[in-house]
Amino acid sequence: MPNLEEHCNHSKDRYSVEGRDIHIWLDEPCRIYAGNHRILRHDIETIELVGKIFGDKYGVTLAKNIASDHIYLDRIEKKEKEFEMEKPEYEKKREELNKELLREQAALPEIKIADMKNYLDRFFGHKKPELRQLAEVSLKHWQSYLLSLDNPYRPLETKDITRFVSQLNKKLGSPRTVSNYLGQLVLYFKHTYNEELTNAIKRELKVFDKEIAKAEKNKLPIRVSEVQTLYRAAILPDKVAIRLLLFENIPITKLGKIYFFEELNGKYHFSVNKEEKSLNEETIKIAKPLLKEVKGDNKRLLDFGDRQLDQHFYDLCIELGMINKITPMDLRKFGKNHHPDDLTEWLSMINSRPTNEKT
């Protein structure tokens, strides 16, 4: 017969919990009846009873599954003659319980999604659309991790954070991306989880922040050829952003808040913080396809924030195999350190890729 440890190991393999107290309770009559104790607490009616007794701790369905496995293994190994007749009934019960557990597991993330929506509304609302978008993507990765757990019922532990971050790092690749996502999740953990788990994810965030800081410290000044390489490969919105960083004295955080309107003669006017802004004519010419695509009243030149732009550049540098990871701030400094005529000449040397090649 399977002993206590074997029953516990079986439950842990299937459900990530031992259910030790359930197994002890089921076999408790052995103190009086020894090997014959299985005439008690080893039937289908007991499975329902276990759900009532241990349901608060494990969840009713999980508790019943643990009991069902214990009873089934004991009875089938003993090969009792009467069990051969009862076996179909037990197997049907086990199948029903397995399906019920799967349904509960599939429904569990809906609770998490509600928490996520509540968090997004509470911290972001509609005031910071770019941060809300980043938070949504971060939470989707967290939701995906929760779905991958063998047993969503058990409490989360610090090791779960480490595993999640490892998974996130493999999926996303760059320390900067992981750091951005973890930065959003720290707030969510404060909102939904306990202090221990919040501190665990903060520690993981610090690791990636240190990697980024070290890379920035050791970075060499960017060269003309690197700026040209980045510009050549950039999609149209990023291409316009690069020109704004090089030619215009507009704060990086305001690049996504440049608004425009078109006169009847086809001339465009731009404003930042409600103050009219004159932009480089060549930049306007290149940006016209973007302006034509804008619908409704939200007449923004670029539809993203500085964090997204930073990530776009970083990902593009990775894709191009560039040693230096160019940031918006690097481009701003590069523009200030060179004459506008030189910048115009260097960019004009590039055969721009067609704007409809990549959206």
Image (tube, rainbow, N blue to C red):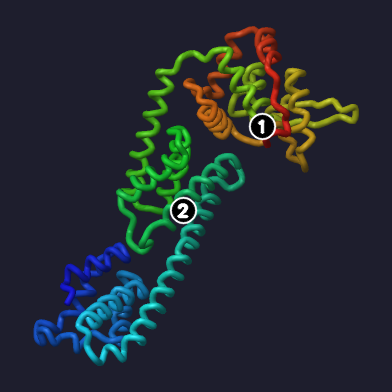
- Placement of 109 over or under 19, stated as above or below: above
Residue 42, numbered circle: none
Residue under numbered circle 2: 144
For the question of whether residue 310 can be seen, the reply is no
Please state if 51 lies on the left or on the right of 229 as rendered.
left
Q: Could you tell me residue 196's position as x and y percent?
A: 31, 48
Q: Residues within 10 Å of mark 1 (few under 14, many from 20)?
A: some
Q: Name the quarter where the C terminus is drawn.
A: top right
Label 1 SS: helix
Q: Amino acid at mark 2?
A: Ser
In space, the residues marked 2 and 1 are separated at their CA atoms by 33 Å
Classify 10 Å Cα crowding around label 2: few (below 14), some (14-19), many (20 and above): few
* Relative image position of residue 3 (x, y in whole percent): 16, 73
The mark total stands at 2
Decide if residue 83 is in sight here.
yes
Asked if 84 appears above or below 23 in the picture, the reply is: below
Residue 66 falls left or right of residue 122: left
Place of residue 125 in the rendered image (x, y in percent of width and height, measured from the top left): 58, 48
Residue carrying label 1: 257
